[in-house]
Image: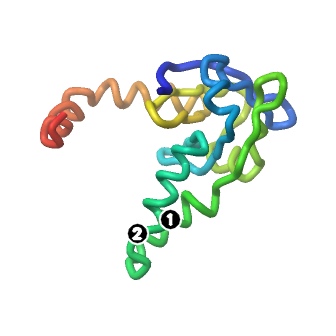
Amino acid sequence: MFIGEYSHNLDDKGRLAVPKKFRTELSKGAVVTRGLDNCLFLYTKSEWKVLADKLASLPFSQANSRAFARLMLAGAMDVTIDKQGRIVLPDYLRNFAGLKKEIVVAGLYNRLELWDQKKWEEYKHQSEQNSGTIAEQMFDLGI
């Protein structure tokens, strides 16, 4: 289970140190892909397989299904944790998420999200300001 919020720096070669508490689980293999809200999603291989299977089963005839599958699957890249606990984020994914130097790694149960620190702060502030409305909508979903 991935939880918590961690600040790390991206080096000049596009390497990001994975928080130590997540390295063991990710050392068996990981996949990084385009996420939603201008961030990247980082999955273990087993969680990625669950998601990829669901995406592959979406109705091919629906444009939104095709578009979402393309966003997630075509943008995906296998990553390996090196001996220093780092992964290399490809240029096209760093550009997609606007990742520069300061990165936030946010644990969201079955995935990690990688955010540009300024974008994360803006997103978090907006979510906190709208927390009452968000909570009401979650109630309608049974949460």
Q: Nearer the viewer, mark 1 or mark 2?
A: 2
Mark 2 residue crowding within 10 angstroms, few (<14) / some (14–19) / many (20+):
some
Q: Residue at left 70%, top 52%?
A: 77
Q: In this view, does 31 lie to the left or right of 89?
A: left
Disc 1 or 2, which lies upstream in sequence? Answer: 2
Q: Name the residue under label 1.
A: 69
The kind of residue on which mark 1 rests is Ala
Q: Percent x, y for residue 73?
A: 58, 61
Give the quadrant of the C terminus.
top left
Along the viewing direction, whichever of 57 and 139 lies nearer the viewer: 57
95 versus 88 height, above or below: below
Q: Mark 2 points at which residue?
A: 58
Q: Percent x, y for residue 132?
A: 20, 27
Along the viewing direction, whichever of 69 and 54 lies nearer the viewer: 54
Q: Which of the 4 image quarters holds residue 62?
A: bottom left
The kind of residue on which mark 2 rests is Leu
Say if mark 1 contacts mark 2, CB within 8 Å.
yes
Q: Residue at left 82%, top 22%?
A: 84
The kind of secondary structure element at disc 2 is loop
